[in-house]
Image: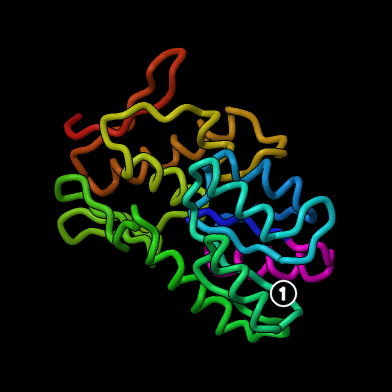
Amino acid sequence: MRLLVAEDDPKLLKTLVHLFELNHYPVDGVSNGTDALDYAMSGEYDGLVLDIMMPGMDGIAVLKKLRQNGITTPALFLTAKTEVYQRVEGLDAGADDYLPKPFSTPELLARVRAMLRRKDNFTPDLLELGETKLNRSTYELSYRGQTLSLSGKEFQVMEMLMQKPGMIVTAEQFITHIWGWETNVDVSVVWVHISNIRKKIDALGAPIGIRFVRNAGYVLEEGK
């Protein structure tokens, strides 16, 4: 579940990004409303955490623009202001929830989890392809009682493949979704992670494989 965090306080932004990463959420952070709109318009995110008071464009304006353009990504507003009218304005703009500052870490994480559960295309913690299973809570890949742990990036690559079995996922899609828009990571890093995943699939004896399609990308398939 990839998140976009928009917060103009650099210290709080850094803290939020670190917090979500510690809790296994891939996350991008921006510090103004203009960037928040540009990033969110990509449709690459499963949830948005938006400050209301930001330079360039405030959070409410950002969300209104997204909703006008058909972007339905669930959103949680963070703000230092607690007046009832602002809560109403934010919810009317299309927000799913509202959390005033200061807030506790457990409450923020709980509200984000609840927001993601409301997502229309929410998927369960267990992804399956035949008898091969990927546990999204423990980062474990299993087949007929045998289990192996995946690293964080291996898990994210495998998750994308298992969400679209039989469909091509390009190297660029992996890079954008996992490492973010502004990364310097190149396709060789994707290849290394896929190579490691293939070894673990073989070690499990699972009847699935990741096939490379020349000039296109990678496909997860049943059978070998």
Name the residue rendered at 43%, 54% in the picture: 150
Q: Is residue 141 above or below residue 51?
A: above
Horizontal side of 53 relative to 78 (left or right) equals: right
Label 1 secondary element: strand
User: How many neighbours does mark 1 have within 10 angstroms: few (below 14), some (14-19), or many (20 or more)?
Assistant: many
Q: Which residue is mark 1?
A: 79
Q: Residue 224: x percent and y percent?
A: 20, 29
Q: Residue 223: x percent and y percent?
A: 17, 32
Q: Residue 142: x percent and y percent?
A: 26, 56
Q: Nearer the viewer, residue 38 or 81?
A: 81
Rendering quarter of residue 129: top left
Main secondary-structure element of the magenta-colored stretch = helix
Q: Residue 180: x percent and y percent?
A: 64, 43
Q: Is residue 199 above or below residue 46?
A: above
Q: Is residue 25 visible?
A: no
Q: Amino acid at mark 1?
A: Thr
Whether the magenta-drawn stretch holds residue 82 is answered as: no
Name the residue rendered at 51%, 76% in the picture: 111
Q: Nearer the viewer, residue 206 or 4?
A: 4
Name the residue rendered at 48%, 43% in the picture: 70
Whether the magenta-drawn stretch holds residue 18 is answered as: yes
**Magenta-drawn segment:** 7-24
Q: Is residue 110 above or below residue 169?
A: below
Q: Nearer the viewer, residue 166 or 34?
A: 34
Rendering quarter of residue 17: bottom right
Horizontal side of 191 relative to 185 (left or right) equals: left
Pick out the residue farthest to the top.
215
Q: Is residue 63 above or below residue 16?
A: above
Q: Is residue 12 visible?
A: yes
